[in-house]
Amino acid sequence: MKSKVIPAMLLSSTMVSSAVLAEHSNKVIGQKVRFHYEQVENVNMFYREVGNKDLPTILLLHGYAASSFMWRDVIDALADEYHVIAIDLPAFGFTQSPAREDYEYTFANLANTVDKFIKQKGINSFAIAVHDYGAPVGWRLALKNPGKVTAIISQNGNAYEEGLADGWEPIIKYWQDPSAKNRAALSDFPTPESIKWQYIEGVPDLQKVSPDGYTLEGLQVSKAGMAEIQLDLLLDYKSNVEQYPQYQAYFRKYQPPLLAVWGKNDPFFSPAGAQAWKRDIPKAEIHFFDTGHFALETHQSEIIPVIKDFLRRNVK
């Protein structure tokens, strides 16, 4: 078979076109996202970063079953005005995580790892945007660093018992009796099929749900040992509910600017969890959208302008 050689003229044209496209992309996106790893003890943390470090920092914390990839549109939208960091938590995304026996997979330890990451990066103040599991990590960070948190954005990240919807019933049974039988009853939770269900449940128009997110996380949870780690975290979520009063006391005392952008059809976190913030932060801004758990997958064009407006008024 003869090798194919690209003519010099075509190669030159291709290179010019690529340069033009790159320049256009940078103008549209604002600044190019940078992809890094940061070694935090025995966790090699993957994170996405964009923006000038002299600008206010926004820390993005994903939930289950997701990664920093879930924030891709938010990252692009905020790139020109903020320093944005989106991390992959241990056991998620591209973060290189220790084996189950070499790392304590609890929410307290996830928060400790992220807190050390923040200190290593020299970040002295930051707003947090949280989703699902990222919420209790964020609340624990706020308790550790109350003077550093400038504002809070929650996309279906809960802090109130009334926000626990019917989807938690079999999980609560596991909390009350963490037997092998009740753990086995949740064995379908960390599976690709269950993850896809979480992305599409409560979404009126499934054509709006890209397969990228649930496919990537389905591959992640299928890795050897990962299902057991996820069941460990699911059991430890009980500790977050037990700490809800502490989180609420923080909200009442410090009155951080807070925005909730909520998929109202979420099978795990009901609208009542978002509305409850008004008790502790009367000026909290609450917005509901006709979608499910991953609201940014389907309603990014409606949610991102709300986020940008909130940040411009509250984070300088």
Image (cartoon, rainbow, N blue to C red):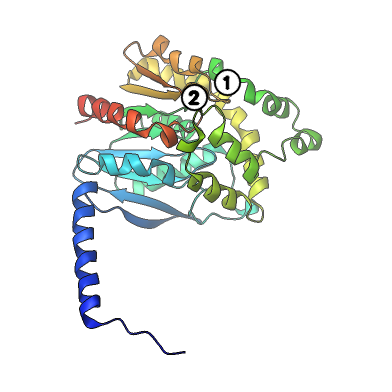
Q: Is residue 128 left or right of residue 131?
A: left
Q: Is residue 275 left or right of residue 228?
A: left
Residue type, numbered disc 1: Leu
In the rendered structure, find residue 158 and report the number of the disc placed on it. Answer: 2
Residue type, numbered disc 2: Asn
Q: Is residue 195 left or right of residue 314?
A: right
Q: Residue at x 39, y 24 (%)?
A: 261
Out of 107 and 35, give the one closest to the viewer. Answer: 35
Out of 253 and 38, give the one closest to the viewer. Answer: 38
Q: Is residue 46 left or right of residue 124?
A: right
Given the current orientation, which residue lies at the most extreme right position? 181
Out of 13 and 25, give the one closest to the viewer. Answer: 13
Q: Residue at x 21, y 65 (%)?
A: 17
Position of residue 18 relative to residue 178, above or below, is: below
Disc 1 crowd rating (10 Å Cα; few below 14, some 14-19, many 20+) is some
Say if mark 2 contacts mark 1, CB within 8 Å: yes
Residue 265 appears at what percent x and percent y?
52, 22
Residue 302 appears at what percent x and percent y?
33, 28
In the rendered structure, find residue 270 and report the number of the disc placed on it. Answer: none
In the rendered structure, find residue 164 and report the number of the disc placed on it. Answer: 1
Residue 119 appears at what percent x and percent y?
35, 45
Position of residue 221 relative to residue 281, above or below, is: below
Q: Is residue 52 visible?
A: no
Q: CA distance from mark 2 to mark 1?
A: 8 Å
Q: Is residue 29 visible?
A: yes
Disc 2 crowd rating (10 Å Cα; few below 14, some 14-19, many 20+) is many
Position of residue 217 relative to residue 239, above or below, is: below
Task: Choose the circle earlier in sequence order: 2 or 1.
Answer: 2
Q: Secondary structure at mark 2?
A: loop
Q: Secondary structure at mark 1?
A: loop
Q: Residue at x 54, y 38 (%)?
A: 64
Quarter holding the C terminus is top left
